Amino acid sequence: MYLIKKETLPASTYLDEMTINQIADFQNNKYAENTKAAYVQDIEYFAAWLNAACGEKFIPQPLPRERLAPGEVALPLPIDLLKKYISNHLKGLEPEVDRILCTPVLLKNGKTVTYKANPGPLSLATVERRLAALSVLHTVKGFKGYNNPCRDPEIREFFTLYRREYGDMQKQSLPITEDILNQMMDATDDSLTGIRDRALLAFGWATGGRRRSEICSATFERLIRTGDGYVYRAGKSKTNQKGENKEFPLKGDAAAILDEWLKALEKLSITSGPLFRGIDQTGKVSNNPLFPTSVNYIVKKLIRKIGLEDTKYSAHSLRSGFATESGIKNIPEQDAMALTDHKDVATFRRYRRLGSVLNNPGANIFTRKKSAQGVISNEHL
C-alpha cells in the first residue's frame, strides 16, 4: 500500500520507481504525505544539481565503486560531495549552474519541471531539509547510523559551522500580526473573491494559525456551529499523523467574517464539501478546494495591496503571526500552543519571541519631550 498516492509524486527524471516506493513506505506513517513528496523532490533536485554542477549522473542505488561508469555517482555519497552541496547552496551557486537549475526542463511525459525557483543562495532551513531527504534515501537503501554519510560526525560539524554563521540570517516569512491582518482585510472588496479572501484569512489566522494545507482541506462537514461562533474539527495534518480529531475555536469577528462567506455560498446552493474554493474570472465558484499555492498567492496579493513587500510574507505568516500576537497580548504559552498545535516548544517560542519582546514594558521607556524653547536644556546633564 502506497502512503503517497502515485499521482501526487513528481514525474521523476532521475529516481526509479522502486526508490520512490521505498521512500513512500519509509517507516510507515513516520512522515506526512507532503513531507514524503517533498523528500522525493529534494532528491530529484540533488540529482539535477549534481549534473549541472559536476557533470555527473546520480545513481540512487548502493553500488561498488568499481561498477560505476565514468561520470556516475552512487550511494553512499562521498563526504566531500556533501560538503560541496551544502556550501555551494549557502554561499551561492555558480551563475551558469543557477541558470540551468532555474530553466524549465521538458520531461518525457510532456510536462515541464523547474528545479530552482530563483537564482541565489538557499536558506539554511531549506538546505537542512534537503540534507534530511538525502539522509532518508540512504536509510531506505540500508545505510544506517554512521554508515549514513549525511549523519557522519564530519558532516554534522561542517553543518554546525555554517549554522553558526548563517543561523541568524535564515529567510523566514515575517509574521502577519493583528494590525496587518486588519489592513489586508480592508484591502478586499465585496465581490465573491473578496468575501472568500477575508474568510480565508480569518479562518487561517484566528483558529491558531492553520497551515495552508489545513486551510485547503477544511470542509463544511468539519465545521460545528456553536452559540458564539464555530468549532473546527481538524483531521490529519503534519503534526497529527494519526488523524485524531482536534478542535479549534473560531469566535467573535472571525466567526462573523466566515458567516458572510458561508451565506454567499448558500445562495449558490453550496452547503457541503470544501470551504475554500477557486473562483474564476466570471465569478463561478469551483467544486474543488483551493491549492495550497493559491493560499500563498492570496496572502501575497493582499500584502502588496497594503504597500508591504510580498517577498517577505507567505501563507506561513498567518501561523507565525498568530504566535507572535499571542506574545504581544500575553496569552499563556500553553493556551496559544493548544491552538497552533505546535509539538516543539522551541519552534513555537521562536515565533512568539518577537511578540514578547514588543510587549516588554521596557520598550516604552523612551518618550520624546521638548523644552519650552523646543530644545532640551543642558542644566540637567
Image: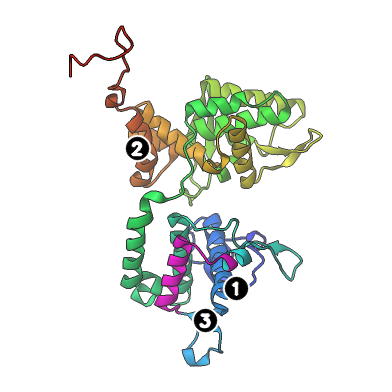
Which element is circle 3 on? strand
Callout 2: 10 Å neighbours few (<14), some, many (20+)?
some
Q: Earlier in the sequence, mark 3 or mark 2?
A: 3
Is residue 224 placed above or below 35 in the rendered structure?
above
| Amino acid type, callout 2 | Arg
Residue at the spot of label 2 = 353
Q: Residue 205's x, y, as percent?
A: 51, 33
Q: Are marks 3 and 2 in contact (CB under 8 Å)?
A: no
User: Which tag is nearer the camera, tag 1 or tag 3?
Assistant: 3
Question: How many angstroms separate mark 1 from mark 3 (CA)?
Answer: 13 Å
Q: Is residue 89 left or right of residue 378?
A: right
Q: Which residues are magenta?
A: 76-96
Residue at x 50% of width, y 41% of height: 245
Disc number for residue 350: none
Main SS of the magenta segment? helix
Q: Nearer the viewer, residue 4 or 359?
A: 359
Callout 1: 10 Å neighbours few (<14), some, many (20+)?
some
